[in-house]
Image (spheres, rainbow, N blue to C red):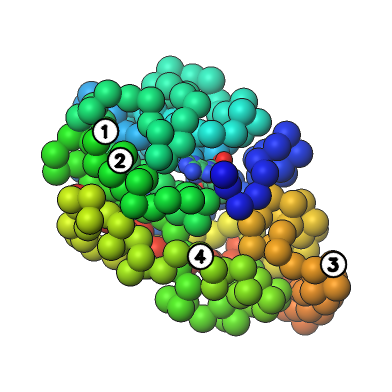
Amino acid sequence: MARISYDDQTAAAYKSVREVPRAGLAEWREAVRQHLEPAPGMTVLDIGAGTGAFAAAFGDWFGVSVVAVEPSAAMRALIPPRPGIKVLAGDACDIPLPADSADAAWLSLVIHHIPDLAAAAREIRRVLRPGAPVLIRQGYPGRSDAAHTFPWEFFPETARAASTFPSLEQVCQAFLTAGFRRDSVEQVPETLLSLTEFLGRADTFRRSDTIMRGLTDAEFLRGKERLRRAVQQAGRAHSEEPRANWLELLVLR
Ligand SMILES: C[S@@+](CC[C@H](N)C(=O)[O-])C[C@H]1O[C@@H](n2cnc3c(N)ncnc32)[C@H](O)[C@@H]1O
């Protein structure tokens, strides 16, 4: 059971405001390439694939086949139907694939939705070939200063929900127990939105985002007001520049 319900409305909101544009993913493309070492015929498992933004990107960037495993029917329905992406109903603890059948696993912003990380790590160990990497794109409590991280800086109470996410140590422990070893962890920047775009899309963003859904209406409105003032103070040129955000790439093998 995910922390929020990914129903039709949430899926549509996610698709419209949460998919990072390709231009904002240049550093992710290089970071993933380095650890994935893509090769012809490779199959990458995208667990909790959502609306398929990364499944499509991995096909375009690296020419690999992607198996997108996603529990929400509404999210699955928005994955682009195209050759090279196979879409399956399933979740991190129940992957409908035989043992030793995938060459890598990708989990982007999924870890906090998984109810039993130890069971998920065992299931991922089962379906991956020996030595295959698990690449995890995620933020962890205590690893960055939320007060200065775009876009959470405007909504400081998001720290409440974010603090309940699994820590980096808990995630590593679950995977180590399942037989993986920690390979690397690094911060990777991306650009999603400008200040002006975030202000215009804040309500839709809130509908699609687990930690913003945890805000009260009053907290959300106060944050929007801070954002409105920041847009005014930044002036037109600065407020329309895409802002950088960082997440971490954890690699286990
Ligand atoms: C924040 S979205 C991320 C989607 C996509 N990975 C991305 O980065 O755009 C989280 C996704 O995880 C899925 N999810 C929820 N619980 C899950 C579980 N136990 N195992 C796998 N995926 C899960 C949700 O349905 C949702 O599509």
Q: In which quarter of the image is residue 15?
A: top right
Q: Distance between the residues labelled 1 and 3?
A: 43 Å
Q: Tell me the residue that label 3 is attached to.
A: 217
Residue underneath mark 2: 124
Q: Do the residues labelled 1 and 2 touch (CB within 8 Å)?
A: yes
Tell me which residue sits at (44%, 59%) in the image.
Answer: 138
Front position among marks 3 and 2 = 2
The circle on residue 74 is none
Q: Is residue 118 above or below residue 223?
A: above
Residue 41 left/right relative to 121: left
Residue for point 46% across, 36% down: 91
| Discs 4, 3 touching: Cβ within 8 Å | no
Q: Where is residue 31 in the image (x, y as percent from the top left)?
A: 31, 55
**Along the polypeptide, which appears first: circle 1 or circle 3?**
1
Q: Mark 1 points at which residue?
A: 127
Q: Would residue 206 be seen by someone viewing this image from the given angle?
A: yes
Residue type, label 2: Ile
* Amino acid type, mark 1: Val
Residue 41 image-quadrant placement: top left
Residue matched to label 4: 165
Residue shown at 38%/25% (left/top)?
A: 96
Lower position in the chain sequence, tag 3 or tag 2? 2
